[in-house]
Amino acid sequence: MSLAVGDAGFGYGPVPLFSGLSFNVAPGEAVAVVGANGAGKSTLLRCLAGAEVLDSGSVLIGGASLDESSAAFRTAVASLLDDADHFPDLSVVEHLRLLASLHSSPFDVLALLEEVGLAAVADQLPPTLSSGQRHRLGLASCFVRPRSVLVLDEPEQRLDASGRAWLRSRLLAEKAAGVAVVFASHDQELVEAVACRTVVL
C-alpha cells in the first residue's frame, strides 16, 4: 500500500515547521526524513500516523484520505513515535500477544522476542525495563502485527551497534516484503543502507 503526502504544511501559531511538502512512498520503498533537531521530523511523522492533523495539504494511504479512526487505517499503518506507550500491567510477552490477537495476527511472539533481544525479560512489566528495552518493545509492537505502511521516529534510538545492524536488516526485509517505510533518523549509515531517497526538513 502506498503513502502520498501532498503540499503538506504544519506550524505552531504563526511559525511554520514545514510547508509545501510533497513526496510518495510506494510499496517496497523507504523514505528517510532527515534534518536538524526541531526541524519538524517528529511532527511530520505524527501527521502521517494520524496523531496530529496537518494545517494544509493531504496524506493519502493507498489512495484514500488518512482517517486515523478507520479500521482500514489501523490495519494498514504501524507506527513507533516519540511518545510510545505500553500497557503497564501486562508483561512484555502478554503485551505482544494481546496486540497479535487484536489484529488476528499469526506472528510467532516468542520468536519475535528472541529477534529483538527481549526473550530474557519476557515476563517483566514495561515499567521495569530499561529505556533501550522499552524501545525494543515499541519496535516489536510494530512487527507483531500486519502492516502495509511502517512509520518510525528515530528507530535507532538507544540501540547498540549490534542492535543497529539488526534494525538495518529488519527494515530491508520490510521493504522486500512490500511494506512502504517512512522513518526519521540521525543515523547516516541507516539512511544510506535502507532509504531509497530522503526528505530534508
Image: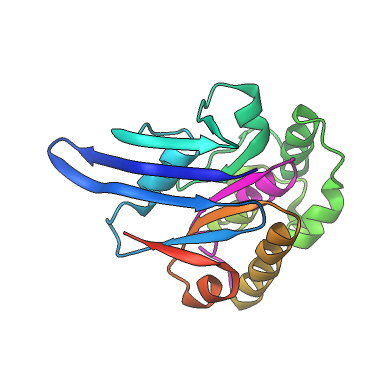
The location of residue 194, given as percent across then percent down, is: 59, 69
Residue sitting nearer the eye, 178 or 103: 178
Which segment is the magenta one? 137-160
Answer above or below: position of 45 versus 196.
above
The location of residue 34, given as percent across then percent down, is: 39, 64
Q: Is residue 7 visible?
A: yes
The location of residue 2, given as percent across then percent down, is: 60, 45
Taking the spot 69% from the left edge, 50% from the top edge, the residue there is 140
Q: Is residue 129 visible?
A: no
Magenta stretch holds residue 190: no
Structure colour scheme:
rainbow
Taking the spot 28% from the left edge, 40% from the top edge, the residue there is 10
Answer above or below: position of 79 versus 56.
below
Taking the spot 44% from the left edge, 65% from the top edge, the residue there is 198
Taking the spot 63% from the left edge, 56% from the top edge, the residue there is 136
Residue sitting nearer the eye, 115 or 52: 52
Magenta stretch holds residue 156: yes
| Horizontal arrangement in the rendering, residue 4 relative to residue 104 (left or right) | left
- The image quadrant where one finds the N terminus is top right
- The image quadrant where one finds the C terminus is bottom left
The location of residue 45, given as percent across then percent down, is: 44, 46
Where is residue 101, by image quadrant? top right
Answer above or below: position of 185 versus 91.
below
Answer above or below: position of 196 versus 58.
below
